[in-house]
């Protein structure tokens, strides 16, 4: 995220600092999501964000033009690819290589994607959910949805408004998702907590008690789309690779996979073993860095 002061046309903050301003800043200060659904939505803001991030590690950017790598959704169009390429060129990179996000996530999760054995990964980010069967540094079968963790938050906001006549912000919805959210019935007692926001009937601020059963109902539709993407990917996987997938199972990466019980829902619907990567939040960036460092091994996975 990028926080912009529209009066002075100045960038105030990026990243987590900007995200904390969401729903709390004056009208003139606007937190912007320059990348939405996995693609560039505001090119100028993407350039600003990248410039600040690169300068943290490359303070002598004008003297040394580094090589960069960018992870992109597997269904990125040529127009969207040109927008990303333009942003990387403007910030001073010598060249930017592209790698599809599921492949980068699989590399970061330690899967041998360069071999002929099939590996299956499900990467759920803020705006996308990508499922892929990978072999020999390429995607053999896969599905890419413009549905991710942000959609789970929006579903919770919508449920609270529709069913409880109560308005909450996106950050509150995200907090509820992390604390009591689940995709599968919890063992033992369901969890409860009080959500703070505004009562639609009285118009006054207040709180309302919600439980994990209600949050599970709220996110049922986007979770269903994610599970269906896994099913469709398995149906289009060649039989030879299906044997590998059956033996090794599905690996989940990305922040969205931290939703409680998501793996169990997939196991129930596909009868396939599912496990979470050791460090799901960082798999994609770690995998991209490894692909850049070991370009000879992952050459077929990289493009310009």
Image (cartoon, rainbow, N blue to C red):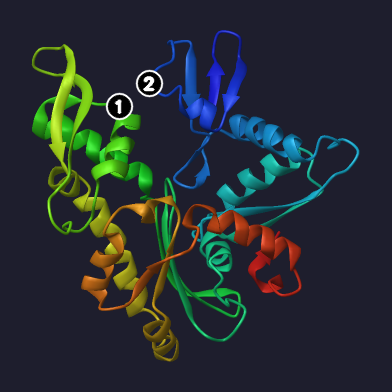
Q: Does residue 172 appear to the left or right of 290 in the view shown?
A: left
Residue at image x 55%, y 33%? 15
Q: Is residue 17 toward the left or the right of residue 235 in the image?
A: right
In the image, taking residue 190 as reference, residue 246 lies left or right, namely right
* Residue 227, position as x, y percentages in the image: 28, 64
* x and y, in percent, of residue 275 in the image: 38, 69
Mark 2: secondary structure: loop
Badge 2: residue crowd in 10 Å (few <14, some 14–19, many ≥20):
some
Q: Earlier in the sequence, mark 1 or mark 2?
A: 2
Along the line of sight, the residue nearer the viewer: 82 or 39: 39
- Drawn side of residue 133 relative to residue 9, left or right: left
Going by the picture, which residue comes out furthest to the top?
Answer: 7
Reading the image, the residue beneath label 1 is 169
Residue 1 visible at all: no
Helix, strand or loop at label 1? It is loop
Q: Residue at x 28, y 42 (%)?
A: 179
- Which residue is farthest right? 63
In the displayed structure, 64 sits above or below 169; it is below
Residue 187, by quadrant, is bottom left
Whether the residues at callouts 1 and 2 have beta carbons within 8 Å, the answer is yes
Q: What's the residue at 24%, 65% (across, down)?
A: 265
- The one nearer the camera, 48 or 57, is 57
Q: Which of the 4 image quadrants contains residue 298?
A: bottom right
At 46% from the left edge and 64% from the top edge, which residue is drawn? 277
User: Where is mark 2, residue-wise?
Assistant: 23
- Quadrant including the C terminus: bottom right
* Above or below for 225 versus 59: below
């Amino acid at each position: 995220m990028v926080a912009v002061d529209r009066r002075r046309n100045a960038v105030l903050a990026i990243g987590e600092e900007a995200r904390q301003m969401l729903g709390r800043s004056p009208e003139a200060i606007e937190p912007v999501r320059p990348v939405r659904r996995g693609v560039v939505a505001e090119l100028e803001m993407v350039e600003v964000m990248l410039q600040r991030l690169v300068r943290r590690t490359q303070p002598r950017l004008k003297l040394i033009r580094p090589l960069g790598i960018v992870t992109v959704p597997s269904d990125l169009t040529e127009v969207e690819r040109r927008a990303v390429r333009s942003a990387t060129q403007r910030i001073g990179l010598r060249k930017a290589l592209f790698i599809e996000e599921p492949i980068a996530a699989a590399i970061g999760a330690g899967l041998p994607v360069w071999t002929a054995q099939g590996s299956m990964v499900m990467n759920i980010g803020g705006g996308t959910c990508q499922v892929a069967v990978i072999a020999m540094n390429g995607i053999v079968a896969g599905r890419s949805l413009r549905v991710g963790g942000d959609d789970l938050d929006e579903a919770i906001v919508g449920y609270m408004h529709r069913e409880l006549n109560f308005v909450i912000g996106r950050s509150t919805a995200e907090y509820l998702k992390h604390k009591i959210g689940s995709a599968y019935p919890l063992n033992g007692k369901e969890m409860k907590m009080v959500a703070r926001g505004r009562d639609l009937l009285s118009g006054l601020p207040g709180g309302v008690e919600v439980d994990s059963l209600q949050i599970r109902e709220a996110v049922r539709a986007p979770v269903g789309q994610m599970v269906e993407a896994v099913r469709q990917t398995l149906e289009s996987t060649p039989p030879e690779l299906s044997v590998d997938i059956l033996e090794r199972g599905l690996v989940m990466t990305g922040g969205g996979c931290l939703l409680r019980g998501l793996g169990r829902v997939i196991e129930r619907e596909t009868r396939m073993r599912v496990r979470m990567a050791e460090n799901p939040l960082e798999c994609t960036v770690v995998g991209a860095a490894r692909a850049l460092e070991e370009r000879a091994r992952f050459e077929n996975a990289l493009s310009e």
